[in-house]
Amino acid sequence: MKYISILLKLLINGQKEQLSVMKSMTGFFQKLEEKEEEYLSTKEVLMKIDRSPRTLDYWIERKILIPIKINGSNRFRKSDVIRLLREGDGQ
């Protein structure tokens, strides 16, 4: 019985370590993807979408295009802008 409890403890500890490693790897890959993502400024987005600043504000209010704050400035994922252009103008 003593050996079984020792084996169970080892198994549980091994699973915890494995889970911890998996979580850290997931975080690493998410950060890597974020670094690879290109971000556009508001001015760059307006040039690409060829719309007024008010239209961009409307899209932000309606969560059609969601900005990300980077160093206090709004940035937009380039992939989101491209998706919006492909799907239509969101109005």
Image (cartoon, helix red, strand yellow):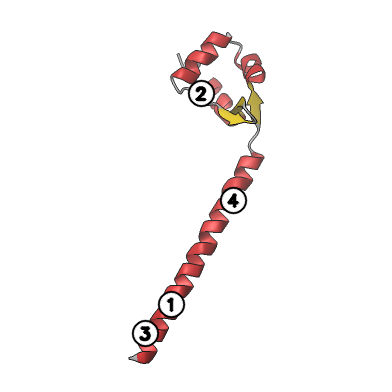
Give the left or right position of residue 32, taking residue 19 as reference: right
Mark toward the start of the polypeptide (3 vs 1):
3
Q: CA distance from mark 4 to mark 1?
A: 27 Å
Disc number lying in front (4 or 1): 1
In this figure, which residue is indicated by the disc labeled 2?
65
In this figure, which residue is indicated by the disc labeled 1?
11
Q: CA distance from mark 1 to mark 2?
A: 47 Å
Mark toward the start of the polypeptide (1 vs 2):
1
Residue type, numbered disc 3 = Ser
Which dot marks residue 29? Answer: 4
Disc number lying in front (3 or 1): 3
Which image quarter holds the N terminus? bottom left
For the view shown, which residue lies furthest in the left direction? 1
Mark toward the start of the polypeptide (4 vs 1):
1
Q: Neighbour class for label 4 at 10 Å: few (<14), some, many (≥20)? A: few
In this figure, which residue is indicated by the disc labeled 3?
5
Disc number lying in front (3 or 4): 3
Q: Neighbour class for label 2 at 10 Å: few (<14), some, many (≥20)? A: some
